[in-house]
């Protein structure tokens, strides 16, 4: 990355676009400008305090509720809308869907005053403080940028974008505007995986040695879903790759991935990893920790979602989630009476609700979001590196992927097509541990330390 920078007063976040200078930031570079101040967000609830198993939203005085809009009234949008409707201090006031009848049905079901077929009417609504983006992936980046331009806080379902350069642009648009951006990585809110994470943090199994995750779907998706979806690492394994990082508590170094087709032979004519219905990855983390991921688009025994961590003094593992605890005892079988949940919304319904509540809590209390734009960016980098590894049959360092992006300003980025595109020595090298340095600091980071000090450390190391 190469970037411009300006001189900034540590006491102000006023925006200046002059005195541009090219600066290299260690191993990864991006455009840095002074950032506009984030206006105080209307926090605090006027409703009674509600407690859940992971969240407590408390207020000391009654204030106006945070008003939100939801873009997309499909399955995921309805789940989020239902959770928003129950969260204290947050009120949905408008929903949109291209098929306006779906928006109307959602508005009636949850008592939302306004509905529309146009997402921009949600984004530009002067009464809206925050927007939930639950639209198809190809619209995410543009809608995030539009929200930032209109001063709206953003919750966006994964991915931010399928293109790395556009992902950086969208994150920087929010950070430059001083609005919150939370990415939907719902597995991080699953109580099973959270328990594993707690065991690691509290050293219940000692120091981590090996992390294992698996994801196996009940049945393969239609050909039309796979075609153009970016491949098995992008549309499936990315969740597990992010989970290994979440459990490791560190940034990964490199990856080795392989893929094959066993289930649906019709996809074998598709390009790259779209032709795979089965894949495995090994991820190297610092301190010799390794993670192993396996994914398959079909499991004959239901939706298989498990994680395991081996430590120096023990092991912790999760089981699948079943619709009930009933067991059958017979002379030829002893076990669960029913199969595990066979659909991701059934399996992760509680996690989707909890992540929505977490962003609501962040808005109401003006606290840091638990899944940042950087988390979404790293997940994409990991999936792209896995794809590259499978295609080239070798270990791929994540720095190789980061180094493919060139930014002339925070919101003007492109992919470097080849080494000859720029003069010798111009193409930067990246390091995944410096991803927090290649984007503008977000609104919550700026509250934690002087932005002037942060900028100096980023430039001069």
Image (cartoon, grey):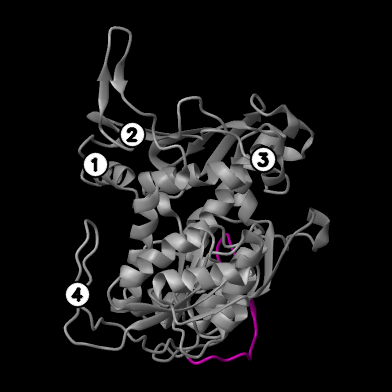
The residue at which mark 4 appears reads as: 58
Q: Nearer the viewer, mark 1 or mark 3?
A: 3
* Coordinates of residue 324 in the picture (x, y in percent): 28, 36
Can the viewer see residue 71 in this picture?
no
Q: Which comes sooner in the sequence, label 4 or label 1?
A: 4
* Coordinates of residue 297 in the picture (x, y in percent): 57, 34
Q: Which comes sooner in the sequence, label 4 or label 2?
A: 4
Q: Nearer the viewer, mark 4 or mark 2?
A: 4
Decide: marks 2, 1 in contact (CB < 8 A)?
yes
Q: Secondary structure at mark 2?
A: strand
Can the viewer see residue 461 in this picture?
yes
**Rounded to the nearest whole Å, what is the CA distance between mark 4 and mark 1?**
27 Å
Residue at the spot x=45%, y=31% of the render?
Answer: 302
The residue at which mark 3 appears reads as: 222
Q: Quarter-wise, where is residue 170 in the image? A: bottom right
Work out which quarter of the rendered image holds the N terminus and state it.
bottom right
Is residue 279 rendered to the left or right of residue 46?
A: right
The residue at which mark 2 appears reads as: 309
Decide: marks 4, 1 in contact (CB < 8 A)?
no
Q: Which residues are magenta?
A: 14-29
**Rounded to the nearest whole Å, what is the CA distance between mark 4 and mark 2?**
35 Å
Secondary structure mostly taken by the magenta-highlighted segment of the chain? loop
**Rounded to the nearest whole Å, what is the CA distance between mark 2 and mark 1?**
9 Å
Q: Nearer the viewer, mark 4 or mark 3?
A: 3
Residue at the spot x=34%, y=86% of the render?
Answer: 42
Total numbered circles = 4
Relative to 296, does residue 249 appear above or below in the rendering? below
Relative to 216, does residue 361 appear above or below in the rendering? below
Which disc number belongs to residue 199?
1
Q: Which comes sooner in the sequence, label 4 or label 3?
A: 4
Q: Secondary structure at mark 1?
A: helix
């Amino acid at each position: 990355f190469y970037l411009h920078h300006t001189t900034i007063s540590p006491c102000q976040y006023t925006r200046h676009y002059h005195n541009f200078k090219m600066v290299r930031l260690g191993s990864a570079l991006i455009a840095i400008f002074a950032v506009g101040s984030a206006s105080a967000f209307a926090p605090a609830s006027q409703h009674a305090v509600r407690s859940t198993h992971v969240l407590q939203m408390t207020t000391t005085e009654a204030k106006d509720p945070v008003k939100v809009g939801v873009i997309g009234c499909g399955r995921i949008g309805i789940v989020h809308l239902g959770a928003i409707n129950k969260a204290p201090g947050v009120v949905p006031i408008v929903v949109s869907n291209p098929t306006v009848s779906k928006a109307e049905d959602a508005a009636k079901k949850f008592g939302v005053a306004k509905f529309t077929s146009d997402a921009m009417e949600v984004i530009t609504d002067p009464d809206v403080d925050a927007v939930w983006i639950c639209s198809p992936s190809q619209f995410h980046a543009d809608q995030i940028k539009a929200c930032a331009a209109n001063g709206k806080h953003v919750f966006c379902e994964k991915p931010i974008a399928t293109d790395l350069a556009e992902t950086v642009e969208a994150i920087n648009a929010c950070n430059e505007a001083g609005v919150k951006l939370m990415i939907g990585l719902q597995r991080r809110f699953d109580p099973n995986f959270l328990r594993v994470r707690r065991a690691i943090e509290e050293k219940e199994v000692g120091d981590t040695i090996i992390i294992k995750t698996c994801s196996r779907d009940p049945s393969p998706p239609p050909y039309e879903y796979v075609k153009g979806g970016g491949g098995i690492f992008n549309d499936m394994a990315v969740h597990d790759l992010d989970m290994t990082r979440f459990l490791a508590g560190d940034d990964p170094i490199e990856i080795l991935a392989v893929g094959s087709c066993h289930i649906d032979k019709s996809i074998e004519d598709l390009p790259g990893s779209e032709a795979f219905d089965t894949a495995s990855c090994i991820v190297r983390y610092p301190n010799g920790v390794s993670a192993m991921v396996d994914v398959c688009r079909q499991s004959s025994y239901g939706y298989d979602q498990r994680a395991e961590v081996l430590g120096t003094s023990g092991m912790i593992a999760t089981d699948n989630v079943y619709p009930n605890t009933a067991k059958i005892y017979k002379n030829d079988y002893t076990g669960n009476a029913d199969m595990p949940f066979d659909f991701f919304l059934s399996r992760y319904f509680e996690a989707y609700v909890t992540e929505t509540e977490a962003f609501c809590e962040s808005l109401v209390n003006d606290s840091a979001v638990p899944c940042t734009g950087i988390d979404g960016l790293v997940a994409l980098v990991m999936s792209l590196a896995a794809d590259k590894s499978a295609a080239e049959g070798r270990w791929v360092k994540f720095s190789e992927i980061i180094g493919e992006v060139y930014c002339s300003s925070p919101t003007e980025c492109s992919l470097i097509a080849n080494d000859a595109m720029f003069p010798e020595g111009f193409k930067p090298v990246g390091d995944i541990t410096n991803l927090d340095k290649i984007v503008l600091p977000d609104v919550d980071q700026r509250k934690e330390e002087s932005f002037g000090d942060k900028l100096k450390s980023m430039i001069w190391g």
